């Protein structure tokens, strides 16, 4: 969850839709590093005199050579399961990837459940986020999307809570109120975080 500020997710493939009786879909999201953040992060790193030049170069190489990752969202009726596509893991070397949270998420909207499946601490129950519509729109593919924002409470590696604002773009034309991770509950499929 901490790493989500480093990424931008964009839905790039709507694989299967069946809106009739079972509201089923499989969506692939492309997780990429947010280049605006990387540039400011690397500038600050370059200005840090306490970090050796070799370490600075290694970090810069990892960020600039990071490859996008695919995440899958499977939806059936009022449930969804979101996870990193394991078939695309890099076999040689280290890939910083998208810096997105790689833990799977299970959502059941009829029961109000959002569960993060953490490999280190087990099942973590999350509260649904409260969204505010901004009135902004933009086209993503063939869909006119609306923007919604929320303030998300996260826990840092330094051991304290902090709040960050998250903006998403959802497509009201796609009547599925799901999205990646715990971003759910809007009147349409979230296509971009």
Image: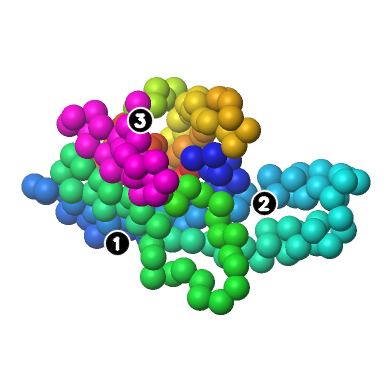
- Read off the magenta span: 104-127
User: Mark 2 touching mark 1, by CB under 8 A?
Assistant: no
What distance separates the C-alpha of mark 1 from that of mark 3? Answer: 28 Å
Q: Residues within 10 Å of mark 2 (few under 14, many from 20)?
A: some
Q: Which mark is drawn over residue 15?
A: 1
Q: Who's the residue at 56% across and 60% down the image?
A: 97
Q: Position of residue 122 (x, y in %)?
A: 34, 42
Q: Nearer the viewer, mark 2 or mark 1?
A: 2
Q: Which residue is mark 3?
A: 126
**In front: 128, or 146?**
128
What distance separates the C-alpha of mark 2 from that of mark 3? Answer: 29 Å
Q: Residues within 10 Å of mark 3 (few under 14, many from 20)?
A: some
Note whether residue 22 is visible: yes
Which element type, helix, strand or loop, lies under badge 2? helix
Residue 138 in the image: above or below residue 93: above
Q: Which residue is mark 2?
A: 35
Residue 2 lies in the magenta stretch: no
- Considering only order in the chain, which callout, 1 or 2, is on the residue closer to the N terminus? 1
Q: Position of residue 87 (x, y in %)?
A: 39, 70
Q: Residues within 10 Å of mark 1 (few under 14, many from 20)?
A: few
Q: Who's the residue at 59% across and 37% down the image?
A: 157
Q: Position of residue 98 (x, y in %)?
A: 55, 55
What distance separates the C-alpha of mark 2 from that of mark 1? Answer: 27 Å
- Most extreme residue toward the right is 49
Q: Nearer the viewer, mark 1 or mark 3?
A: 3
- Considering only order in the chain, which callout, 3 or 2, is on the residue closer to the N terminus? 2
Which element type, helix, strand or loop, lies under badge 3? strand
Residue 137 in the image: above or below residue 49: above
130 sits to left or right of 8: left
Which element type, helix, strand or loop, lies under badge 1? strand
Magenta: main secondary structure: strand
Note whether residue 144 is visible: no
């Amino acid at each position: 969850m901490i790493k989500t500020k480093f990424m931008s997710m964009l839905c790039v493939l709507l694989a299967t839709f069946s809106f009739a009786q079972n509201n089923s879909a499989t969506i692939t999201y492309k997780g990429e590093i947010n280049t605006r953040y990387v540039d400011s992060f690397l500038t600050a790193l370059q200005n840090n005199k306490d970090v050796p030049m070799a370490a600075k170069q290694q970090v810069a190489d990892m960020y600039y050579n990071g490859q996008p990752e695919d995440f899958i969202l499977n939806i059936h009726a009022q449930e969804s399961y979101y996870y990193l596509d394991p078939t695309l893991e890099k076999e040689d070397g280290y890939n910083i990837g998208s810096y997105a949270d790689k833990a799977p998420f299970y959502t059941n909207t009829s029961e109000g459940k959002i569960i993060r499946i953490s490999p280190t601490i087990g099942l973590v129950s999350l509260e649904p986020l409260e969204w505010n519509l901004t009135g902004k729109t933009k086209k993503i593919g063939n869909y006119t999307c609306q923007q919604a924002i929320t303030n998300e409470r996260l826990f840092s590696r330094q051991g304290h809570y902090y709040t960050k604002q998250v903006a998403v773009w959802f497509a009201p034309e796609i009547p599925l109120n799901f999205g990646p991770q715990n971003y759910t509950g809007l009147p349409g499929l979230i296509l971009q975080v």
